[in-house]
Image (cartoon, rainbow, N blue to C red):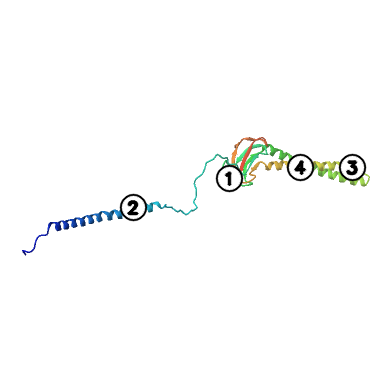
Amino acid sequence: MNSNSTAPTPPIRLMRIAGIVAVLVIIGLIIGFVPRRINRHKLLEEMHADSIPTVDVILPAASESNLGTPLPAEVQPFMQASIHAQASGYLKNWFVDIGDQVTKGQILAEIDTPELDRQLVQARAELDKAKASLDLAKITADRWTELLNISGVSKQEAAEKKADYAVKKADVEAVRANLQQLEELKKFSRVTAPFSGTITSRNTDIGQLISANNGTEFRVILFFEQ
């Protein structure tokens, strides 16, 4: 060792130590400050981001709604009719039942009409008898007219035969009209639907006595689809 070298003086040594400490302090401050600075910056950015409102945008689209409010209501048919029997007798056949769908003109029931059938037989017999009387009256009137031409009978007698012929002719028309009325009534022994629809009620059954226009009815209801 050089005898001329001397150890650093205490002041210089202290200054070095102080400088090292100062550097360490500065480094410590930097190490502690920078992360806090960064964290503070991030916190400010997050606060700024949170301050901006977020809006969800949904595009409208049509959809089926199953929401509904149940309310009391009553279903009424578009058309309904009460079909009354127009021929008296006994219900012979019932071709449909409640709930059945029927079409216009379809036969619903058939009524056995023994009394009406008897009247028809009698009316046909009366018509045949009236026609026979008419034929005889015509022959007699024609004969008396010929006799009148040869003065074989008086004018009064010939006129009486012509009048009798006219009466017999009127009798035939009256009996024929009665027969036609009974035949039309016989058609009602088959009850038909006035329009297409659904049988909803009836108050009679096979074998029951039915009086024409006396409350016995077959009801047909038509539901018109909207």
- Which numbered disc, 2 or 1, marks the residue that appears first in the sequence? 2
Q: Could you tell me which residue is drawn at 80 percent across and 41 percent down? A: 171
The mark closer to the camera, 3 or 4, is 4
On the image, the x and y values in percent for residue 123 come to 74, 40
- Pair 2/3: label in front: 2
Please report whichever mark, 2 or 3, sits nearer to the chain's N-terminal start: 2
Element under label 2? helix
- Circles 2 and 3, Cβ within 8 Å, touching? The answer is no
Question: Residue 182 placed where, x, y %?
Answer: 72, 41
Q: What distance separates the C-alpha of mark 1 from that of mark 3?
A: 65 Å
Q: Nearer the viewer, residue 189 or 179?
A: 189
Image-based side of 92 in relation to 181, left or right: left
Which residue is under mark 3?
A: 159
Where's residue 214, x and y in %?
67, 35
Pair 2/4: label in front:
2
Q: Which residue bears the numbered disc 2?
A: 43
Task: Tell me the crowding category of disc 1: few under 14, some 14 to 19, or many 20 or more residues within 10 angstroms, Cα based.
Answer: some
Amino acid beneath label 3? Ala
Q: Look at label 4 and name its amino acid.
A: Ala
Question: Which of these two is toward me, 173 or 49?
Answer: 49
Marked residue nearer the N-terminal end (4 or 1):
1
Residue at the location (61% across, 42% down)?
220
Q: Earlier in the sequence, mark 3 or mark 4?
A: 3
Of labels 2 and 4, earlier in sequence is 2
Residue 177's label in the rendered image is 4
Dot placed on the residue nearer the N-terminal end, 1 or 3: 1
Quadrant in which the N terminus is drawn: bottom left
- For the residues labelled 4 and 1, the Cα–Cα distance comes to 38 Å
Q: What residue is shown with label 1? A: 101
